[in-house]
Amino acid sequence: MAMDVVVWLLVCLFGSFAEANTSLSWFDFYDAKGISGHNDELIADINEEECARRCLVGTSAVPSGSCLSFEYDNSHGRCILSTSTKDTPGAELVESSPPSRFDYYHRRNAPYGPCDFETDLCQYTQDTADDFDWTRDSGGTPTGRTGPTVDHTSGNSSGYYMYIETTLPRQDGDVARLTSPSYRAYPDGQCLLFWTHMYGGQIVRGELQHYCKRL
């Protein structure tokens, strides 16, 4: 069974497995797409959700990770997987005839793209069952001699990162947790990369650490 990976970002970082998500919400919807030479596999007699699942987990003709979009023929219940995107040269978004006979689903960049927290939380969410929240910030944290003055992505004080404040009213055992969107596990494995910074009166030395979780 294909498995998704949900990453919980804690004071220490770890991975957790969850049941596969084949939701169409992983795709942007358009009425139809006209493009020649990029219809890589036609699968008959399946519904849209199953078509989305085939695109996400891969097939023998369109391997895992290579399916970037699909068209669904509502009139005949057919799925057309494609390694092209709406931005592939020659692609044209069109109105199908009759309307919505062909639905076109373009795979979203997130949650597969990199997350640097420069504009938002990148689909991470604050866990409502923990004790306090992570904060998006740049240029240093409020408490003196704690937190990074620069982020890893930009290397300057204008870059953003996520941090937690551990001074009062925080107590030993408090948990702050960010939950990632679901990441699809690849058959040959994959690696989630994190950069962590630890600096403060109770830390031996401040450092920016590279953390890799092999899935």
Image (tube, grey):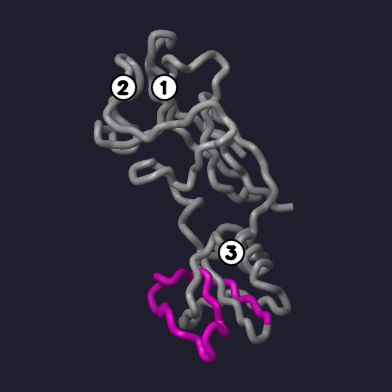
Relative to 204, 17 lies left or right: right
Q: Earlier in the sequence, mark 3 or mark 2?
A: 3
Relative to 159, 14 lies left or right: right
Is residue 23 covered in magenta? no
Residue named by callout 3: 24
Q: Are marks 2 and 1 in contact (CB under 8 Å)?
A: yes
Q: x, y percentage for residue 17? A: 67, 41
Mark 1: secondary structure? loop
Mark 2: secondary structure? loop
Residue named by callout 1: 165
Q: x, y percentage for residue 42? A: 64, 78
Residue at the location (64% across, 71% down)?
A: 48
The amino acid at mark 2 is Pro
Separation (CA) of disc 3 from disc 1: 37 Å
Query: Extreme front residue here?
Result: 169
Residue at the location (38% across, 16% down)?
A: 199
Query: Extreme bottom residue here?
Result: 97
Q: Are marks 3 and 2 in contact (CB under 8 Å)?
A: no
The amino acid at mark 1 is Glu
Q: Identify which residue, 180 or 142, lies in the foreground.
A: 142
The amino acid at mark 3 is Leu
Residue at the location (68% across, 67% down)?
A: 50
Q: Earlier in the sequence, mark 3 or mark 1?
A: 3
Residue at the location (39% across, 24% down)?
A: 208
Residue named by callout 2: 142
